[in-house]
Image (spheres, grey):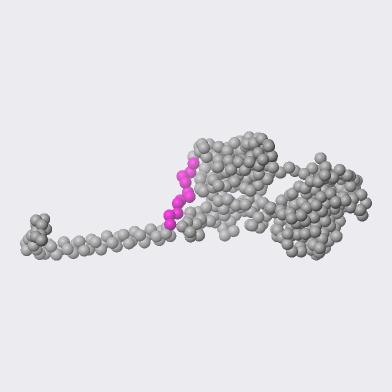
Amino acid sequence: MKPSSASKSRGEMIKLMMASSPLKYNQMKKFVKYAGALTMLLLLTLVYSACKKNGGYYDAADETAPFSGNIYEYLKSKPGVYDSLIVAVDRMGLKKTLTDSNVTLFAVTNPSFQLALRNLNTLRKQSDKDPLFLSNIDGVQLDTMISYYIIRGVKPTDSLKLQDGLNLTSVKVAYPMHAKSVKGSASGQVGAGPEVIEFSNTKKSKFIRNWSTSTTASNNIRTKNGIVHVISPDHLFGFDGFVTRLTFVPPPPNLMVTVGGTFSTNRENGGGPTSGENSKKVIDGDDHTKFLCDLNGFLTMQFKLKTPEVSSVYTLTSANDAVERDPKAWTYEGSQDGVNWTELHRVSNFFFEERYQQKVFRCTNTVAYQYYRINITELRSGGVFQLAEWTINKTK
């Protein structure tokens, strides 16, 4: 097959160049060779620099340009994002705090409030109750929960990078919270993602397993009077206590306090009646102390009232740790003389869902007894019993 006219032309041009100027032709070949090598070296250098700088991932900056106003004005500048938070802040009188105090706000977005209210109203609907909204839910409970998120002082992520994080204090009731700056995961690699804050409700417990924790979606939004960290939208406002706080019916007055009397038990703490976890801790009104002892088959706690009273309500509060020590089965009994007893209530296969949890139990008693007792017959496991609080309560 004959070569094309174009191929003949190129070949003739090369021959002509070589014949007319072999030096120029050799220089051009060298230039092309070195230019190709230089281009390859430059590409390799750029790839290496990118990997060295970012560690193989892109770490999005969490520092944003400072907002020109205060924290409250920042929330107002984001319609459709913080509307529910603004309603709660206004209702609880916290606007001034977010305007002129040096604080850190862990900002909760609309989806977090919507999820919490949906869960609450689903439960209320099952009981044929009207729905509740931020405008009419219990103000005391809302005040407690909104204060979780407003922290004293300015706390950027740099201040939260300690190995154990940082203990924080809420502005209104000095409630203990905790925050820790960590690297998230990316592409299945732990610590290879952007920086996030683990923000925790400690529930006044030193044990991390009892905490309720959420993470941030954006950090370090600086304003005139503090910093805003934005909580991830899958967070449930109020942490895991929103529904229980708003559906919990508090017990009637504690007869141990209003009437008074004498407490006794058939078991005592191994350290004796003056030890740090002695039997009297179960009626001291402080859920952060507890009564700890060996069960040895069963445990009886008894209270003799100064005068007979009708009690159809009593409460138990779980202690701070070791769920296996929780009572699982018991009877609640009344007596006129401390010898002959009438069973008022029986419980079996019971479990506390969390630590420091008060459970209210009701029975149908209508008799005024002077003696009341609870007989613990079974624990979740093992043979060591603990309980933070026991109360005998007046019938409404």
Magenta span dominant secondary structure: loop
Q: Which residue is at a point 47% across and 56% down the rendered structure image?
A: 186
List x then y, in percent, for residue 34: 22, 63
Using the rendered view, name the quadrant where residue 164 is placed.
bottom right
| Residue in the foreground of this view, choosing between 48 and 115 | 115
Q: Residue at x 53, y 56 (%)?
A: 182
Task: Please check the rendered image and state whether residue 356 is part of the magenta-colored stretch, yes or no.
Answer: no
Q: Position of residue 233 (x, y in %)?
A: 54, 45
Left or right for 327, reference 134: right
Residue placed most toward the observer, 344 or 226? 344
The magenta stretch spans residue 62: yes
Q: Residue 213, image x and y in percent?
A: 60, 52
Instruction: Give the percent coordinates (x, y) of residue 169.
Output: 63, 49
80 vs 265: above or below:
above
Q: Is residue 99 visible?
A: no
Q: Quadrant of the N terminus?
A: bottom left
The part of the chain drawn in magenta is 57-67
Q: Is residue 241 left or right of residue 259?
A: left
The residue lying toward the viewer, choosing from 200 and 322, is 322
Q: Residue at x 77, y 56 (%)?
A: 329
Q: Is residue 89 above or below residue 323?
A: above
Residue depicted at 93% across the width and 51% down the height: 337
Q: In the figure, residue 119 lies in which quadrant?
A: top right
Q: Is residue 40 at least partly visible in the picture?
A: yes
Q: Is residue 288 above or below residue 225?
A: below
- Which quadrant, please, contains the C terminus? top right
Task: Pick the residue in front: 313 or 26.
Answer: 313
